[in-house]
Amino acid sequence: MNNWISTLATLQNQGEPCVLVTIIEELGSTPRNAGSKMVISAAHTFDTIGGGHLEYKAMQIARDMLVRGQQNTHLERFSLGASLGQCCGGVTVLLFEPMGQVQAQIAVFGAGHVGRALVPLLASLPCRVRWIDSRDQEFPENIPQGVRKIVSEEPVDEIADLPVGSYCIVMTHNHALDLELTAALLKRNDFAYFGLIGSKTKRVKFEHRLRDRGFDTAQLQRMRCPMGLTEVKGKLPMEIAISIAGEIIATYNANFGQHTAGAEPIAKLLPASRRSQAI
């Protein structure tokens, strides 16, 4: 098996996006072989298309694609010569193919009954999931592929390590912990989505306490509570999980690449939830 094929399989299993670079055309007296491939991830390169400045430029382009979350294939034509530090002339055309691009980094706080129904659904999406709880015994024995189980005595401390633009879901067993997680997320304020499980009454109580801590209306509007699509009815854990997963999908499809604190509040993108999540 070619090295690049096994590398792609390994990166896919790890949930790590990468770009496959292929020489698809060679014109002129160049030493490179059409069909040569290399795989480029954010931190590593695998195989080679012949080295030199051309390969260096290919790495720059591929990593820029990864940073921007580009999912479309891309052709780049290089005129070889002095501009690329080559002693011979010619033209090389490279094909850049993004592979395994992650659309969402998701943090789920809480391994209760709804969390156990939700996380396998999220794991089947083009996402990476951090599943966080202080209670190791609440996690299932088999953790889905693409999910990182985090047992932390202080779940709030995990917020500092979340990537910018994360999708954050708070559904712990403890209202006081939910409040502290909410305050920490709103203070950081660089998430793409933040959903808090609970009823409208819970939201009112939390808003009152958060205003006492200095949070303003604009910050509170970024909190989705109750969360989940109203079109998905029911109060069973799986029904609630499906509605939340649907909302996540709708959000990243609408806002992919717009992971800033100035992005539109989720309340403006989705219909108001009427679900009473009694947690």
Image (cartoon, grey):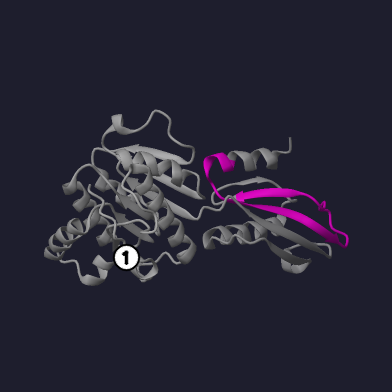
Residue stretch in magenta:
11-40
Amino acid bearing label 1: Ala
| Residue found at x 35% / y 47% | 108
Residue 105's spot in the image, x, y percent?
43, 52
The location of residue 168, given as percent across then percent down, is: 34, 53
Is residue 257 visible in the rendered image? The answer is no
Q: Classify mark 1: residues with Cα within 10 Å, few (<14), some (14-19) or many (20+).
A: some
Judging by the rendered image, the residue that carries numbered circle 1 is 272
For this rendering, which residue is in front, 156 or 217? Answer: 217
Could you say which quadrant of the image residue 63 lies in?
bottom right
Query: In what quadrant of the picture does the N terminus appear?
Result: top right
Left or right position of 263 against 157:
right
At horizontal 24% and vertical 66% (from top left) the residue drawn is 220
Q: Residue furthest front?
A: 233
**Residue 254 visible in this rendered orientation of the protein:** yes
Q: Nearer the viewer, residue 214 or 230?
A: 230
Determine if the magenta segment contains residue 24: yes
Q: What secondary structure is found at the residue carrying circle 1?
A: loop
Q: 175 and 100: which one is in front? A: 175
